Amino acid sequence: MVAVDCIIFGFNECELKLLLVKRQMEPARGEWSLMGGFLGSHESLDEAAARILNQLTGLTGVYLDQLYAHSNPDRDPGARVVSVSYYALIKISEHNQELAKEHGAEWFKLSDIPKLIFDHDEMVDMALQLLRKQARTKPVGFELLPEKFTLPQLQALYEAIYQKELDRRNFRKNVLSMGMLEKLDEKDKSGSRKGAWLYRFNISKYESFKNQGYFFNVSV
């Protein structure tokens, strides 16, 4: 049998988080697991991953990247199952919380992830490695932020992804020098009276610069 498992990352309260569910079947019923399911007879792997993600979050059209085919013969004690893993980046504020509750799903900080079933811990580790590799050279991190964000929020995201503190001055100089952030005539005053300027990632500028040979590059 062929299965698909989704590693779903979100970001809020300055923390990178992982969405997990309680497994509903034996073996390992009631233990923490990634959200997964079997490949339908008339769907592709990408379609299956999108379906499984939608079943848990209610979201469509979010960032999904195929990760790896896990084929160890003993990986699932219940049957011979090959699982293809995908990692997804979603905006936590936009997912359907009622759907998540129906599946017994909870968000966990990276530092608090419980022991997962089968080889799901390995899947999460591989997804984190890929996310850290891609976030430096592709604007995938913006998939985790609201459309409008502050520079402190952007820095907090990268610090959460790489689990280390970044120099504020160097980080701002780096991300602004790429010319892909659009400064808005608005401020976020939730953190202070003075507030912080809001920015938006300009996808058209990114595509234009990429076509000219300039690359997205965040120094971490």
Image (spheres, helix red, strand yellow):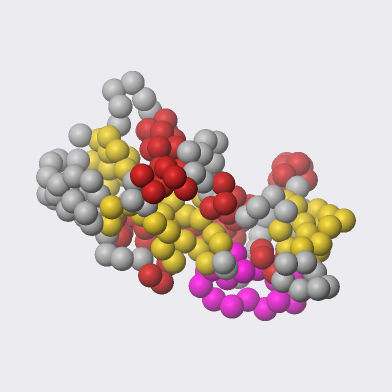
- Above or below residue 176? Residue 142 is above
Residue name at image x 36 percent, y 25 percent: 43
Instruction: Please state the extent of the stretch shown in magenta in the rendering.
Output: 155-176
Image location (x, y in percent) of residue 77: 12, 49
Residue name at image x 42 percent, y 30 percent: 47
- Quarter of the image that includes the C terminus: bottom right
Q: Is residue 14 left or right of residue 110?
A: right
- Above or below residue 108? Residue 5 is above
Q: Is residue 129 left or right of residue 61?
A: left
Image location (x, y in percent) of residue 80: 14, 40
Image location (x, y in percent) of residue 71: 23, 45
Residue name at image x 70 percent, y 69 percent: 152
Image location (x, y in percent) of residue 195: 80, 69
Residue 153 is drawn in which quadrant? bottom right
- Above or below residue 195? Residue 146 is above
The answer to if 168 sits in the magenta stretch is yes
* Res 214 visible: no
Q: Nearer the viewer, residue 42 or 23?
A: 23
Q: Is residue 51 left or right of residue 191?
A: left
Q: Main secondary structure of the magenta part?
A: helix
